[in-house]
Image: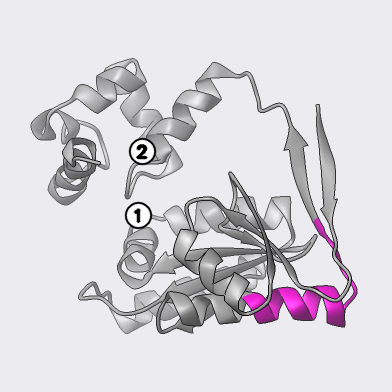
Amino acid sequence: MQSQKIFKLKGKAVVVCDYREKEVASFLKLFGAHVNKTSLSIGDFVCSDRVVVERKEHGDFISSIIDGRIFEQANSMKEEFGKPIFIIEGNSNRSISINALKAAIATLATNFDASVISTKNQKDTALTVFWIAKKEQQGAGRGISIKVGKKSKDERKLQEQIVCGLPGVSTIICKRLLEHFGSVEGAFAASEKELRDVKGVGKKLAKRIRKILEKRY
């Protein structure tokens, strides 16, 4: 069973931060936030009991619109917290038509009550997150509430979480990969050509998956 853990510190903004967001966390501390690092399954920063923030670099944002991943994330964020915020950081060479971009942003706003904010870099992102947390906690008097406790023992869900961690892999494609190859090990061992045999996995995505799997840490 999971329980709710409340974070509240008088006179100081508290941000629950995913442990992978090291640079942003360092800037948050410089701005005066109390940072609690943990492993977040949804979002990158929790700013109150209702606000969760997902940080995306510009290129990943565009990719997530193209493969539909952004809407799955928005739905999870909405269900778990209520108010999703996407921070789009920097610029990239990735692009889509202006109509597709505006349609995606409109869908996020109308279907999921999600906000989209652009920032220049990680420092700018940290400052934005800091003020969101400050306004929520000191302005609105809200605390931070996240679920803690034992994670699900459902092995199928765990397998899906692992494969969904690959870049560009949506929940739908993740399930197709597992069904096609039979296991996480099978999906990870598949060649670029074998990956392309799975519906929805094109040449670019297959290449991207192999690149991250083969890249030295």
Q: Is the stretch drawn in magenta largely helix, strand or loop? A: helix
- What is the secondary structure assignment of the residue under circle 2? helix
Expressed as whole percent of the image width and height from the top left, the position of residue 130 reads 65, 77
Expressed as whole percent of the image width and height from the top left, the position of residue 113 reads 67, 70
Instruction: Tell me the quarter of the image containing the C terminus.
Output: top left
Report the magenta residues as a range: 130-144
Q: Does the magenta portion include 161?
A: no
Expressed as whole percent of the image width and height from the top left, the position of residue 111 reads 63, 66
Q: Is residue 115 visible?
A: no
Q: Residue at x 36, y 75 (%)?
A: 100
Viewer-nearest residue: 169 or 56: 56
Viewer-nearest residue: 170 or 29: 29
Mark 1: give few (<14), some (14-19) or many (20+) Cα within 10 Å. Answer: some
125 relative to 37 in the view: left or right: left
Mark 2: give few (<14), some (14-19) or many (20+) Cα within 10 Å. Answer: many
Disc 1 marks which amino acid?
Asp
Q: How is the image coloured?
A: one colour
- Tag of residue 83: none
- What is the secondary structure assignment of the residue under circle 1? loop
Residue 85 drawn above or below residue 79: below
Disc 2 marks which amino acid?
Ile
Task: Say how many tags the image has.
Answer: 2
Residue receiving disc 2:
173
Residue 45 picture quarter:
bottom right
Q: Are marks 1 and 2 in contact (CB under 8 Å)?
A: yes
Residue receiving disc 1:
67
Residue 196 picture quarter:
top left
Q: Residue at x 69, y 72 (%)?
A: 33
Q: Residue at x 23, y 41 (%)?
A: 209
Expressed as whole percent of the image width and height from the top left, the position of residue 190 reads 18, 25
